[in-house]
Amino acid sequence: MRESRGSGRPGLARPRPERGAPPAGVPVPRSRRTQLHPGAWWLWALALGTAATRTTNPLLLALLITVSGYVVAVRRPHTPWARSYGAFVKLAAAVLVLRLAFAVVLGSPIPGTHTLFTLPEVPLPGWAQGIRLGGRVTAEGLVFALYDALRLAALLVCVGAANALASPSRLLKSLPGALYELGVAVVVALTFAPNLIADVRRLRAARRLRGRPDKGVRGLVQVGLPVLEGALERSVSLAAAMDARGYGRTAEVPPAVRRATAALTLGGLLGVCAGTYGLLTAEGDRYGLPVLLAGLASALAGLRLGGRRTLRTRYRPDPWDARAWLVTASGAAAAALLLLAGSLDPGGLNPGVVPLEPPALPLWPAAAVLVGLLPAFVTPAPETVRDPREEPTT
């Protein structure tokens, strides 16, 4: 039996790598494998969240949560910040429990005939009319609270999906020039607490290795000074790095352009607020979407003009390709179809609880929600690092 050259086993030839291919154990470079634009993930998730706000049907909301969870499961990258999805799921579960607890203790505005149990009622003064503590707890009130809490939980899960799928640093790099300084401040503020916790853990571990106390008031006092010193040094280093990269420098812009930028941005934000309010209320279905689109267009125009004041370059900018358009369009289609279904069949999207009856699953709104699964099939799979010690087995 002939032993192949360079192989650790007789009769097994080591596969020759292709020309230009990276060695085993080295992840594929970003230039060799195009990643999806992080803004596309956020637009997709926010569109699904908008769809969740238009219905209280628990079956449709559960389907929305399942769709976003499946996309996160198959497309979440192997990075530390991608683990935030579990925290959002736990927060959504806590919202459900708290909403049901408030419905039990504080009562519900929905009248019901199916009494589950009765709590001792606490008498309140006259100025607290309309509020009660304890009393009769009905099945209709609990079901109404469950539907309402499930809608907020679905919205939180959609936001958690965006946090798990979109890289914060790449998203910061993709921000327009007018929002870059604000984005840097937000990223620095969000990373301050994790760095502080890491410093505390490191110093407590060092004190335990030296046999010194790391708990109680004495340990906290002796650990606090090195933590503050490290935070100060990190702040000085960050300020020097930002100054070296030209952070905060602006270009000369004519006064007319500045006034137009302020007017477009302020008017766009007011339009977005008014349009969002219209979409969230039943009375604003007619004007909500047009006002929201007009506000977004005005705000984008203002941000584009405001970007002229920022002297900034991008290294390897993320391209907005056809896959980013498909991902954004899938979320927008799900939201638009649910908005249309809410105007055509409001009873299917918002089932009543009086009389108490099981909700039905409307077919074509459910099919509209399933359109949100498109990113699981058109986006690249997350990169994995192969173990260089793996050997072929035959």
Image (cartoon, helix red, strand yellow):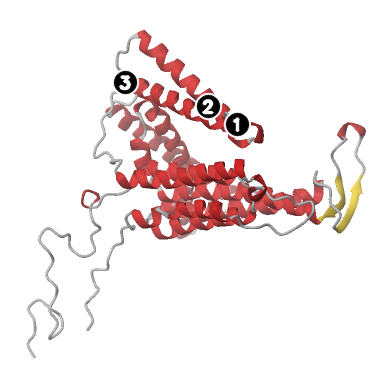
Q: Quadrant of residue 97?
A: bottom right
Instruction: Return the x and y of residue 171 as percentages of the image width and height.
Output: 37, 40
Secondary structure under tag 3 reads helix
Residue receiving disc 1? 278
Residue receiving disc 3? 308
Gap between marks 1 and 2 measured at Cα: 9 Å
Identify residue type, mark 3. Arg
Q: Which residue reaches farthest front? A: 344
Instruction: Return the x and y of residue 160 as percentages of the image width and height.
Output: 50, 49
User: CB under 8 Å between callouts 1 and 3?
Assistant: no
Q: Is residue 369 above or below residue 181?
A: below
Left or right for 223, reference 349: left
Along the viewing direction, whichever of 231 and 285 lies nearer the viewer:
285
Instruction: Return the x and y of residue 358 as percentages of the image width and height.
Output: 71, 59
Question: Is disc 3 surrounded by few (<14), some (14 to 19) or many (20+) residues within 10 Å?
Answer: some
Left or right for 89, reference 30: right
Which labelled disc corresponds to residue 291?
2
